[in-house]
Image (cartoon, rainbow, N blue to C red):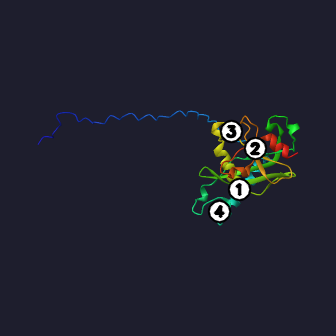
Amino acid sequence: MGALSPSAKAATVQREMQPAPKQVTETAKPAKRVAIQTAAVSSFPRKPQAMTAEQKRLEVAQDGFAHVLDMAGKYPDTYGFLPDERLAAAKLGDAIPVYRIAQQGRERYAGQPVISLFKPADEWVYPIILENRIRYLVQVRYVGHDYVLGHGSRALAMAYDKILARWPASEGFHPQLVTIPNQPFYYFTIPELPDQNITDTSRMFDINPSLSPATIRLASWR
């Protein structure tokens, strides 16, 4: 047999090589600047801010308020509450300044406005309020160089509550409490009324309370 010879030359087929993928190098972008707020740190401790006179008075009144509620839990009637009332709802109201008036005769008064005779008495009363009624008054006095807790009063609270009901602020009245030197009683005046008046707070417990003319009251203190 003759040698077989291919009819065509064998061709070596090689796969076409794909080009190698290009490495992508990301260009680093600069980070954005972010402003960071920092608090200045002092190497020295801060001094506590001094309390104002009003804050000192309020602090003393709050101590009195806490004491009254504690005692009212045991003796509610003594402090103007009912046995079944929720004392936790009671609030301490704003300070009511007390004024004093020097003894004035009828001639010295001469018809001038009563409030022109008033001077601060270095005394304030804070109402304890529950259900829109004043139940008790906490007294704060300025003695020497400090504020101290004074004697509270249920009776004065009841009288002042009646005063506010009769001459409310909503109608433009602003009752003011007044004391007289060497007398333990409290008086009040309604300066917005046309007739000048100074009245003992105990008169509010009368069936038909009436105001006392200032001229008569001042003359009695001569």
Q: Secondary structure at mark 3?
A: loop
**Callout 3: 10 Å neighbours few (<14), some, many (20+)?**
some
Q: Disc 2 to disc 3, how far (Cα)?
A: 17 Å
Q: Does label 1 or label 3 sit earlier along the sequence?
A: 1
Between 106 and 131, the one lying in front of the other is 106
- Total count of labels: 4
Q: Disc 4 to disc 3, how far (Cα)?
A: 30 Å
Q: Which residue is mark 4?
A: 77
Q: Secondary structure at mark 4?
A: helix
Between 60 and 73, the one lying in front of the other is 73
Q: Disc 2 to disc 1, how far (Cα)?
A: 20 Å
Residue type indicated by callout 3: Phe
Rendered view: 199 above or below 72:
above
Q: Secondary structure at mark 2?
A: loop
Q: Which mark is residue 170?
A: none
Residue 213: percent from the left, percent from the top? Answer: 77, 41
The answer to whether the residue labelled 4 contacts the one labelled 1, judged by CB atoms less than 8 Å apart, is no
